[in-house]
Amino acid sequence: MSDNSFKKARLDYNIGSIDFNNIIDPIKLFRRWFDEVYQIDKEEAVSMNLSTISSDNYPNSRIVLLRGLEDGFIFYSNYKSQKGREIEKNPKAHINFYWPSLERQVRIKGTINKTSAKVSDKYFLSRPLKSRIGAILSDQSTEIPLDKDLQKELLGEINKNHNKKIERPNHWGGYYLKPSEIEFWQGKDARLHDRLLYKRKNNEWIAKRLSP
Amino acid sequence: MSDNSFKKARLDYNIGSIDFNNIIDPIKLFRRWFDEVYQIDKEEAVSMNLSTISSDNYPNSRIVLLRGLEDGFIFYSNYKSQKGREIEKNPKAHINFYWPSLERQVRIKGTINKTSAKVSDKYFLSRPLKSRIGAILSDQSTEIPLDKDLQKELLGEINKNHNKKIERPNHWGGYYLKPSEIEFWQGKDARLHDRLLYKRKNNEWIAKRLSP
């Protein structure tokens, strides 16, 4: 890593544009953009950076995976994890989808609620056995010994449980972020990016274009 | 986009591990991880999600590009942009590097300061002419007409200025985030990820392993 290595990684954005003459509903536009990147790279499409606010009032962020889009953007987590505790205390949150394959970002501001137990159960049961057992094994974000062998514990639990139904633990489930603002960002030449911001006002979306 | 499409995008993480028997300085570890992803994809290496806190106390995030690593993680911006105004009001911030090529994240908590005018000047002058002109053309994050043709304005300015030296405007420059916590995350099978968290205490880094 040298000073020079940063300069060589100069991103030039030239793939697309936002059609400002044809403003459509932001959820429709999101689905269109999502489908386009999904054709190229499924994993890239569903990966989103979730930002929350920590107990000492710092922003905090990590990648979570989009698992549905109904009343909002749905993802799943351990409710006792650091992010779960942060959301419990302060539901204000932000999601950034970064889709480098198409030089796009979608930035979403909103508040988070838990999905119903029914929705969480349904999703939990659809996960592979090892992921269900993994959810039970991990006391997320707590300190553990350096030499703990989680993969070995996992194998042991899989052997013990492979004929049993693993039910969803109460501390694991879904969240959805209900959007109040959605910004679409399309990278452009010379950093003169296209940006379109939607804000929800009385159940209507108002759009405006932003300077890059 | 269907319910099913989310499930098909199941990420399995199998590439690497964190060596918990050999804890090294986090900046050294960062440089090692950065160099490894840089060999694969320069753009992926320098792209980082920067989270700040908005004036109405929501987290807010967007991609910025790492341009140096000295007293902290350096990036450049318009100081009058929304992120600039947020940082001015509240310097608490968080960076997440997501490197899917190697199934890694590096999450960094810290506070942001401006780089010196000298550092900002040097970087600004190293940028291509069109990016320098772009920085002057854009009144970042303000509303602009839907039909504004920025690329045309850019070409006009390039024609007018191609023999002139374009100096850095006062409202454009560098920031660096000084880290107080750095977490290394390596994706693992069954969501039993490796996580190593460093916290700075009296100029020393204390490391602990976290449950996935």
Image: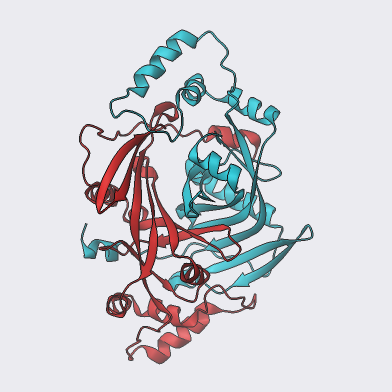
Chain colours: A red, B cyan
Quarter of the image for residue A158 reads: bottom left
| Residue A49 showing in the rendered view | no
Quarter of the image for residue A14 reads: top left
Observer-nearest residue: B99 or B147?
B147
**Residue lying at the far front of the rendered structure:** A202
| Quadrant the C terminus of chain A occupies | top left
State whether residue B96 is above or below residue A210: below
Residue A153: percent from the left, percent from the top? Answer: 51, 83
Judge left or right: residue A137 versus residue B173.
left
Residue drawn 49% across the image and 25% down it? B131
State whether residue B57 is above or below residue B210: above
Observer-nearest residue: B49 or B195?
B49
Residue drawn 31% across the image and 64% down it? A67
Q: How many marks?
A: 0
Residue B153: percent from the left, percent from the top? Answer: 38, 17
Residue drawn 55% across the image and 9% down it? B164
Residue B47: percent from the left, percent from the top? Answer: 50, 44
| Residue A120 showing in the rendered view | yes
| Quadrant the N terminus of chain A occupies | top right
Judge left or right: residue A124 versus residue A93.
left
Residue drawn 47% across the image and 21% down it? B130
